[in-house]
Amino acid sequence: MVEQDNNHQREEEPQKALREHIPTQPEIVRGEGESPPGQASAPEQPGDPLELALLDAAQNRDRWLRAVADCENIKKRAASERTALLKYKHDDLLRDLLPVIDNMERALEHAQSTEGMNAVVEGVNMVLSMFNEILKKYGVKEIDALNHPFDPNFHEALARVPNTDKPNNTVMQVAEKGYLYNDRLLRPARVIVSHG
């Protein structure tokens, strides 16, 4: 007898749990043929508990899939940002080295104009070529600006000089070389542009 009661209780527990989770609405008593205000048909009856549970499970699965997709997108974005950060990590160091190259080039130009300075010229030339090799190793390229059309993305105009020999807005002189670092502008070339 006790065993039958236990079996009966076990059968009722799932139905009781389903009834607790089904939203209940107060029942409205209407006369025959009377429809609810704003509706032409009869009020909807609560669906099958199994269908409601399956619908809820489908909605939860959809939410879970969206959350997983969001997490994957965040991981990909973080990985691409980390890659860009590592690619351009020497930015500041290289920018600081550029004025050293500028001064060495100026010293080299000055030394070449004075006689008896061959040893100094050779030494400065060797150091300059070493600097250039280091820059190439780290992905720094010089911007070739001379006799090219002025491009505000890579050049900074210091002056415009009238010149009828060259086309309008052509770089006539490079006052300070520009450099690219892994295809990103490290420093624009400072140039003097023709004005026809």
Image (spheres, rainbow, N blue to C red):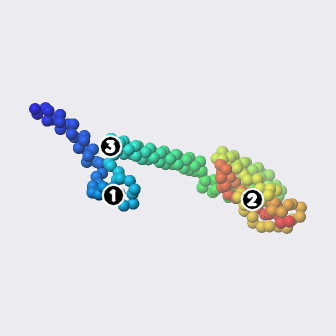
Mark found first going from the N terminus, 1 or 2: 1
Closer to us: 109 or 190: 190
Whether pointer 3 and pointer 2 mark residues with C-beta atoms closer than 8 Å, the reply is: no
At x 63%, y 57%, the residue is 96
Using residue 184 as the reference point, say whether residue 75 is left or right of it: left
Work out which quarter of the rendered image holds the C terminus and state it: bottom right
**Disc 3: which residue:** 48
Q: What is the x, y in percent for residue 127?
A: 70, 50
Using residue 30 as the reference point, say whether residue 139 is left or right of it: right
Residue type at the position of mark 3:
Asp
Closer to us: 84 or 21: 21
At x 45%, y 46%, the residue is 66
Kindly state the secondary structure of the residue where label 1 is placed.
loop
**Disc 1: which residue:** 34
**Disc 2: which residue:** 151
Kindly state the secondary structure of the residue where label 3 is placed.
loop
Q: What is the x, y in percent for residue 143?
A: 73, 53
Residue type at the position of mark 1:
Glu
Using residue 177 as the reference point, say whether residue 10 is left or right of it: left
Q: CA distance from mark 1 to mark 2?
A: 79 Å
At x 78%, y 63%, the residue is 192
Closer to us: 191 or 23: 23
Q: What is the x, y in percent for residue 110?
A: 78, 59
Mark found first going from the N terminus, 3 or 2: 3
